[in-house]
Image (spheres, rainbow, N blue to C red):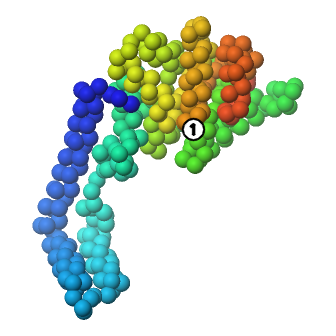
Amino acid sequence: MDLTQSEYDSIMREYEERRLYNAEVIRKRRLELEETLPAYFEIDKKISSASMDYFKSQLTSNKMDKEEYHKSIQRFTKEKESILEKAGYPTDYLEPIYDCKDCKDTGYIEGEKCHCLKQAAIKKLYPHTNLSNKYQNVSFKHFSLDYYDRNDNDAKTNLSSFDYAKNALDYCQDFVKNFNSTGGNILLYGNTGLGKTYLSTCIGLELLEQGYSVLYLTATQLLDVFEKKMKDRGTSARQDFMLLSEVDLLIIDDLGTEFQNSFNIPNVLDCINNRILSEKSTVISTNLNLRDLQTCYTERFISRIVENYKLLRLTGKDIRIQKNL
């Protein structure tokens, strides 16, 4: 994800401002406690003295017992916590504050880009796809099964619209719950207005909340990335394209609504295939059924989907129409 220097510098300034702000909060808290709880800092002096005595003893024949030393430090620590609690403060009141505890607001973990840095790049490159701003009230708990008929059983599967929707909802929730350990891919398919975009958005928002990087693109926006890369060999085009491979979760909404040609189809397949090979998760929603997907994107495409994606079908009547009745 090679940002331009100005974009990268801008993000790094935000990290620095965050660190400075949080450090100032802790500084003010410390000054407050120095006035109200001087006994707290007296124990700090005891800890420093005990540590110095221990390390000095290691240079002599009369070495202090390591276990006893650790026990004394633990006693001092508990005493400090007790002082804070009795005064009505949380025990971590003077602990460093981080917006991202994983990288401690540096953007990197052992030299690798943190998920928060990836998401910062996404926000800068795709501000119009920011799920957290666009879908603030969307959540699994608001996904209502009341719009799905319990009695319109499919002749082949004997499953009702309710059964399909309940299965999709349960799987999507489990997908989010187990994302860290199992990952995976999902294809949500069925006619328009059945909740496919809603469910994929719920997944994206939940994973954003957990700290994963998420990129949401409509199929048309995805093709814009491909076309930009073809026409523009500059850094901006490259970084757009690289995000498709690096992001923890890629959501492609309304696949099949975009203009299809001999250039677009191989790029869509390459994108899907690359993410499968790199074990990066993708959620796709489409109004097309599996046969239509094969017609549009070739047999090879549908083969990769069937092999590597959980297929979740939704059936029933358009929810938006039902709401207006």
What kind of element bears circle 1?
Answer: loop
From the image, which quarter does the C terminus lie in? top right
Residue hosting label 1: 279
Which of the 4 quarters of the picture holds residue 73? bottom left
Which residue is at a point 65% across and 29% down the rendered structure image? 187
Which of the 4 quarters of the picture holds residue 263? top right
- Of residues 162 and 52, the one drawn nearer to the viewer in this rendering: 52
Does the image show residue 115?
Answer: yes
Does the image show residue 145?
Answer: no
Which residue is at a point 59% across and 26% down the rendered structure image? 272
Which of the 4 quarters of the picture holds residue 50? bottom left
Which residue is at a point 52% across and 30% down the rendered structure image? 250
Q: Residue pushed farthest right? A: 155
10 horizontally vs 128: left or right: left
The image shows residue 300 at horizontal and vertical percentages of: 70, 21
Q: Residue pushed farthest bottom? A: 62
| Relative height, residue 231 to residue 273 (above, below) | above
The image shows residue 115 at horizontal and vertical percentages of: 41, 41
161 horizontally vs 297: left or right: right
| Relative height, residue 227 to residue 171 (above, below) | above
Tag 1: residue type? Answer: Glu
The image shows residue 306 at horizontal and vertical percentages of: 72, 29
| Relative height, residue 258 to residue 17 (above, below) | above
From the image, which quarter does the N terminus lie in? top left
Which residue is at a point 67% across and 33% down the rendered structure image? 309
250 horizontally vs 320: left or right: left
Q: How many marks can you see?
A: 1
- Of residues 39 and 88, the one drawn nearer to the viewer in this rendering: 39
The image shows residue 95 at horizontal and vertical percentages of: 28, 60
Q: How crowded is mark 1: few (under 14 residues within 10 Å), some or many (20 or more)?
A: some
